[in-house]
Amino acid sequence: MIPVTKPFLPPMDEYMTQVKSIWDRQWLTNNGPLVNQFELKLKEFLDLNHFLFVSNGTLALQLVIKALDLKGEIITTPLSYVATTSSIVWENCIPVFADIDPNTLNIDPASIEKAITPNTSAIIATHVYGNPCNVDAIQAIATKHNLKVIYDAAHCFNTKYKGKSIFEYGDASTTSFHATKLFHTIEGGGIFTQCPELLKKIAFMRNFGHNGPENFQGLGINGKNCEFHAAMGLTNLNYISSILSKRKELYNFYTSKLENLNVSIPEILKGAEPNYAYYPIVFETEEKLLKSVEQLGLNWIYPRRYFYPPLSSLSYVLKGDTPIANSISTRVLCLPMYQDLTIEEANMACRILLRTQNN
Ligand SMILES: *Cc1c(COP(=O)(O)O)cnc(C)c1O
């Protein structure tokens, strides 16, 4: 079976060496040495000054919304994973959907501007499939209307824009280290911000607000992560260059093999260095997509409809007016991409896609 993704697993003995050290120290969680080491190593790798390791990518979003004290309406994208929208609602704010750019599939800055009302407090945009949003245009709108900008950068490990980590953009960025992501810690998430006060506030918030054993700085929650997840992160970090180069190889292979397939692939923002985390293709019609999914399935190949349905169709939000996202969401399909996927397997998927088109 060929799924859309498979978690990367490092050699077990390397992970077990780290686990053994946890046994020796008997320090399992609460800001342990491996969590500290992981935070340091990751900042070094991404060339960043600030990073907080938290429980998962969803809680990362919720912590940032809470720490920025956002109220009222938050403009966001309908083409993302459900957590982008659900975190907004969970924090008692109202998601307002802007449409996407049909070429990049990221939120369209012109549509953001149209959605602004006196109640808008922020923009939460996803760099979908690992390709940066138009961060310059979004920042210009935010500055003009005095809005905060949060990026859900769950797909963006190692993505760069204008030579800098994409995690440096906006008031804050969040990411996910879930097992299915390009780089993972089994479960885990990250918060990045250039603002030291915000970082400090969130550092308290992720640990119940504790300021010493008998003091509380303010409201907090349990957003910590633990030594075992940090151990997986540290071990996986040793393999990150091979993970990244394998993704790029598969991306280039799909692009060359599918040249004659009647689909479009998202345009990459000028000045961006993407991480090739996903391979989305957009069919001309949903019917063509369904036919391909069926044929791939008959051959035990299971791509995923990332992201369908659009988040604006969730039962607990207002729909908004997003015709482009609604249409593309029915026509976009992500092809298999993972470390163990062989070129032969990717080639088989390509042959089936081409044969289905020509039938
Ligand atoms: C995976 C993902 C999340 C959620 O991350 P978790 O770590 O699973 O909570 C949020 N947003 C996007 C875009 C994602 O792909």
Image (tube, rainbow, N blue to C red):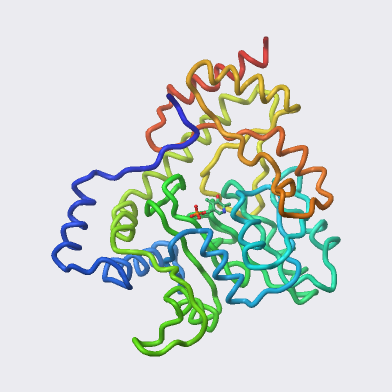
- The residue sitting at 31% across, 54% down in the picture is 232
Picture mark count = 0
- Of residues 195 and 22, the one nearer the viewer is 22
- Residue 291 lies left or right of residue 303; in this view the side is right
In the figure, residue 11 lies in which quadrant? top left
Taking the spot 47% from the left edge, 87% from the top edge, the residue there is 217
Residue at the top extreme, as displayed: 359
In screen coordinates, is 213 left or right of 205? left
* Residue beneath the point at 44% across and 65% down: 54
Where's residue 324, x and y in %? 79, 43
203 in relation to 110, above or below: below
Residue 163: % across, % down: 54, 61
Q: Is residue 219 above or below residue 90?
A: below
Q: Residue furthest bottom?
A: 215
In this view, the residue farthest toward the left is 24
Q: Nearer the viewer, residue 201 or 250?
A: 201
Relative to residue 52, is residue 167 drawn left or right? right
Q: Nearer the viewer, residue 286 or 155?
A: 286
- How far across and how far down the image is residue 209, in percent? 46, 81
Quadrant containing the N terminus is top left
> Looking at the figure, which quarter contains the C terminus?
top right
Give percent across and percent down for residue 65.
Answer: 61, 70
Seen in the image, is 141 located left or right of residue 19?
right
